[in-house]
Structure formats: structure tokens, C-alpha cells
Amino acid sequence: MHKSSHILCIITARGGSKRLPGKNIKLLLGKPLIAYGIEAAKKSKYIDRVIVSTDSEEIAAVARGYGAEVPFMRPMELAQDDTPSVPVLQHAVNVVEEAGDTVDIMVLVQPTSPLVLASDIDAAIEKLVASGAPTCVSVSESTGKLNGAVYAVRRTALMEGDTVNNQKDGTTLPMPAERSVDVDTEEDFRMAESYLRSKQPLTKQ
């Protein structure tokens, strides 16, 4: 894919978490959960900037430590239990554009999807561009259901269409079921941990 668009990655990481407290920076094999998404996004061939939208200074410090930008703190009215993702993402794009940057494509990578790879992110962007679709969302290849890992969205779809998943005209990116874990509970966390542990190279004792 010829790189001509300005592509912004946003990782949304609210401080409050009812089911698994502190999950976004909970250590997964010694690394904060959010670090996996940041590292995958930073390895993307296409993404220009990786920013984290958070209301938590602690999460912000961790995110910066792994190379993400935190150019603003998310307003409290956008950090409630029932806050949908679209206004959070629109707010981030507005802040970035008001500072003089350009956004053509927004990529949402969830901090609760630690098994996402840079190749998944790049494949979603490539499919979005090649298909001409307004959105491309990742799904589990076994069920065809959203796995929440990656959303690649044209600016017009997000800012004017108020969506990250145009179900009528959008397209999807299948991901292996075993990498489609969305960490929301302790059980999800253990599943991700087990998968990552199985992929670690064996070391001599």
C-alpha cells in the first residue's frame, strides 16, 4: 500500500475499571497490559502517531514509558462508565487537528487486546484503503463476531458519520480466535497470559 494518508492511532484507556480493577496497567508477564497495544501500533508500517486517551495520570506515565504520546488528559465527562467510544475518539481527533496535525484515517487499538500484532493493524489499514469502505473492524475468524482489537476508520466516518463500525458499508478483518481475547475479567487475563507464555521461546536452565 502506498503511504499517502495521515494515520493516527488512538488507544483509549480509562482509569476506572469495575470488573478487573486497574486492568489497563495490570502486569501481564511482567509488562503492563496497555504496553502490548502500544508496541504493536508503534511497529505498524503505516501509523504516524500513537496517542493514548486517558483520564489517569498513572496510565499516562506508563503509556509514555512505552513510547506513546499523551498530549492531553481526557475530560472527566468522557471518562464515565457509560461513555461510548465515538465521542472519546472524536475528542482526540479534534485536539490533534486543533494543534495543527492532519488525520485521514483513525486506528483504534484497544488496550484490552494484548494479542494484537502490528501485522493485524497493517492488514486492517490495507483492507480499509483497498476496499474503499468507511470502516474496517477486526473479528474472530471462528465466530465472525467483533473481537474489539482493531478499528480502522476513515475520518469522515468517525467525525461526520459518528461511527467506528459501519455495518452496512464497512468491511472486516478476521483474526485467529486464539488471539481474539478481549481482557475484561480475571479469566480473560489468564487466557491471554497462557497464550503469551506458550509463545515464549524456551530458555536453558
Image (spheres, rainbow, N blue to C red):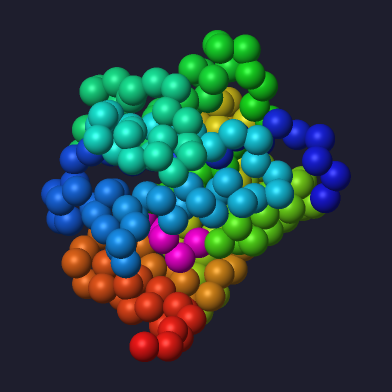
Q: Position of residue 63 (x, y in %)?
A: 39, 39
Kindly indicate the quadrant of the structure image that contains residue 156: top right
Q: Position of residue 204 (x, y in %)?
A: 42, 88
Name the residue rendered at 64%, 61% in the picture.
Answer: 119
Residue bounds of the magenta highlight: 112-116
Count of numbered labels shown in the rendering: 0
- Quadrant where the C terminus sits is bottom left
Left-right relation of 204 to 119: left
Q: Position of residue 107 (x, y in %)?
A: 57, 42
- 114 drawn magenta: yes
- The vertical placement of 146 against 167, above or below, is below
Does any portion of residue 164 appear in the rendered image?
Answer: no
Name the residue rendered at 39%, 21% in the picture.
Answer: 72
Query: Which residue sits furthest front?
Result: 205
Name the residue rendered at 25%, 22% in the picture.
Answer: 77
Q: Main secondary structure of the magenta part?
A: loop
Q: Position of residue 95 (x, y in %)?
A: 49, 17
- 169 drawn magenta: no
Name the residue rendered at 56%, 12% in the picture.
Answer: 99
- The vertical placement of 203 against 141, above or below, is below
Left-right relation of 144 to 35: right
Does any portion of residue 57 appear in the rendered image?
Answer: yes
